[in-house]
Amino acid sequence: MQTERIGPQAGELWHGMEAAGVAERLSASISSGLTSTEAGRRLTSAGPNVLPEAPGRTIRQTLIEQFSSFLILLLLTARKLAQDGSHRGFR
């Protein structure tokens, strides 16, 4: 599907434009927005205004991320060394 380019052209920035100029470029009204006809036409030509949903992470991926941190590995190693030392009479 070919989407139509409505916004600023190369080199133009939305935040640098006056509100009335933006509304005019978008064929919209500042007070009422797009007409129903224009909104329907844009929906047909460009599709719905939605972002694709990001894939979720599995429990395994979450655990790997948690235990791949250097500080976590350091703390686990220190815990293990302290545990081993306490069994040998070191305190």
Image (tube, rainbow, N blue to C red):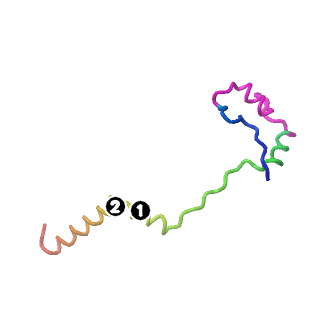
Q: Nearer the viewer, residue 50 or 9?
A: 9
Residue identifier under label 2: 72
Residue 89, percent from left and from top: 12, 73
Disc number placed over residue 66 in the picture, else none: 1
Q: Quadrant of residue 53?
A: bottom right
Q: Quadrant of residue 68?
A: bottom left
Residue 5, percent from left and from top: 76, 41
Disc with the residue nearer the chain's start (1 vs 2): 1
Q: Quadrant of residue 16?
A: top right
Of the residues shown, which amino acid type is indicated by label 2?
Ile
Q: Are marks 1 and 2 in contact (CB under 8 Å)?
A: yes
Residue at the image point whose x is 63% and y is 30% from the top? 15
Left or right of residue 16, residue 21 in this image: right
Helix, strand or loop under label 2? helix
- Image: magenta residue range: 15-37
Left or right of residue 76, residue 62 in this image: right
Residue 5: say if magenta.
no
Helix, strand or loop under label 1? helix
